[in-house]
Amino acid sequence: MSPESLRMKLNYRVVIFLLAALFGLGLSAPSLLGIKGPKITLGLDLQGGLHMLLGVDTDEAIRSKVKSIASSIKYAADDEELIVDEFKVEKNGVSFELLDKDDVPKMDAILKKIPGVAVEKEGLKYRVTLTPKEIESVKQYAITQAVDTIRNRLDQFGLAEPTVAKQGKDKILVEVPGVKTPEQEQRIRELIAKAAHLQLMAVDEERAGRVYQMTPAEAARYGDVILQDAQDPNRKYLVKEIPILDGSMLTDARVAFDRNNQPVINFTLDSQGARIFGDFTGKNVGKRLAVVLDNKVYSAPVIRERIGGGSGQISGGFSVKEAHDVAIALRSGALLAPVFMEEKRSVGPSLGADSIKASMIALITGFLAVVVFMVLYYGMAGVIADVALVVNLFLILAVMALFGATLTLPGMAGIVLTVGMAVDANVIINERIRELLYEGKSVAKAIEQGYANAFSAILDANITTLIAAVVLYAYGTGPIKGFAITMSIGILASMLTAILGTHGIWQMVEQKIDKKSLGKWFGIKLAGGKK
């Protein structure tokens, strides 16, 4: 190897190592010193927060599914101009009757397109019900969808690394770190529990004047339901039970302000929703359309003309904060089934302070023990390994701060474990170099071949550990993910510091090493090529 190529190699490795050190020091400083900049977020077990266990009312998901099927059948029948009578929504299905037998083939074709239903037909009377398999599938999907929806809501709310995971068969675990005030807790609970079920429903104009004299049972006989006004509970509306469309067709919801500078929510529908909305408003000019959110009527404007473009507005005396939270809930999707609180507790930060103190003692003690051992056993080689170890620690903190990762108690355990794994690479390298020096190799050759011989063993060990960390992150929840994150970052950082960085340092100082100083540099003594 020519001096020129050696110098280029030296610069390449050392410059990268120095840049990594500066990067680690710069981005970890805000977390360590409390100065302005990206910081590591502490998990629930370290800084306290809100712990909740939620149940899911899956029966309501079945009712919502049945209503959705009813809406689809009704729209398709109207689109095909089929005459349908006695259209009723039942517990697990829909029943109706055709008035023209010539419409039977068209109705059969419509029903064949709906998955997961069983069709019973007696003459012109139909009964469409969910199959047992579909009922179970809807219940399980409602729980999975609730997990995803709640996580999306908390993410959009701006909370750092909330934990939302299915627990057991039908429970949901929610942990939100950093919640310290009752006001924050109440707002988060409301955001999580809000069904955000948007429906556009036709007002029954024929019987609307009798709404205050009717009971829910009487309304049901006409295929109607009685709903309260969102602002005035004493005001009631009589609307058709089967909605024109629902929030499943909503693509966006944003807070805006009307002409009176009051907050409103503008929503946008997908192509199917826009077509249904446009067709309905075009055919019902002069009638009222109720905008219903979580079974409360926010407005019931008169349709003046066909409304195209698939957009609408929800107004109802929102505060800015309420409008913001409702828009988040609508964007993240309606809960197919309501959730209810089964267990709630606030985790105090005192446990976190004790945990941080104990973990820091363990980390510092373990780190110092490793540092001292390496210096005593390997001499200057141990010092170089310790330098790489320090840079490795700063890199872990820097990367976690850069990506806003959450540090949990198991994550701190992962850092402690990474300290041992990071220095292990240099132990292997130093032992390989020692073996080659015992064989009589020159210092330069011993260093180059030592790194070459040790690399495959280090790479294999780190890759297998990294695979395990990735699997833990993919299938674990909460603290397990925290452990996997710190392990993964630590492994990747150690590959940079313990292999590339120390190799560059050795190339920089190898010219100063002779056989007389091997004891100082590697902790060994040679006499005639032997120890």
Image (cartoon, grey):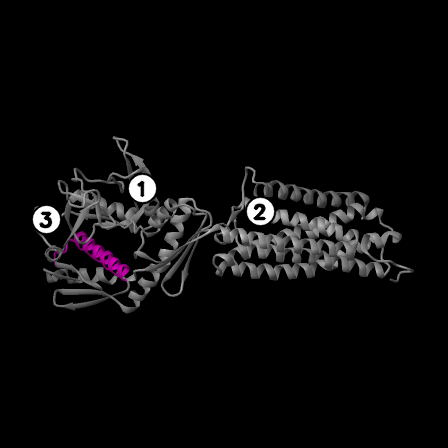
Residue found 18% across the figure and 44% down from its top? 289
Circle on res. 399 = 2
In this rendering, is residue 277 above or below 45?
above
Disc 1 + disc 3, Cβ < 8 Å: no
Q: Earlier in the sequence, mark 1 or mark 2?
A: 1
Instruction: Measure how far apart labels 1 and 2 are at the Cα level.
Output: 36 Å
Disc 1 + disc 2, Cβ < 8 Å: no
Secondary structure predominantly adopted by residues drawn in magenta: helix
Looking at the rendered structure, the kind of residue marked 1 is Glu
* Mark 3, residue position: 212
Q: Quadrant of the C terminus?
A: bottom right
- Which range of residues does the magenta coloring cover? 59-85
Nearer to us in this view, 177 or 443: 177
In this rendering, is residue 267 above or below 439?
above
Circle on res. 322 = 1
Q: How many marks?
A: 3
Q: With 327 as the anchor, is 205 left or right in this view? A: left
Image quadrant in which you'd find residue 74: bottom left
* Residue 158 in sight here: yes
Residue found 77% across the figure and 53% down from its top? 381
* In the image, residue 63 lies in the stretch drawn in magenta: yes
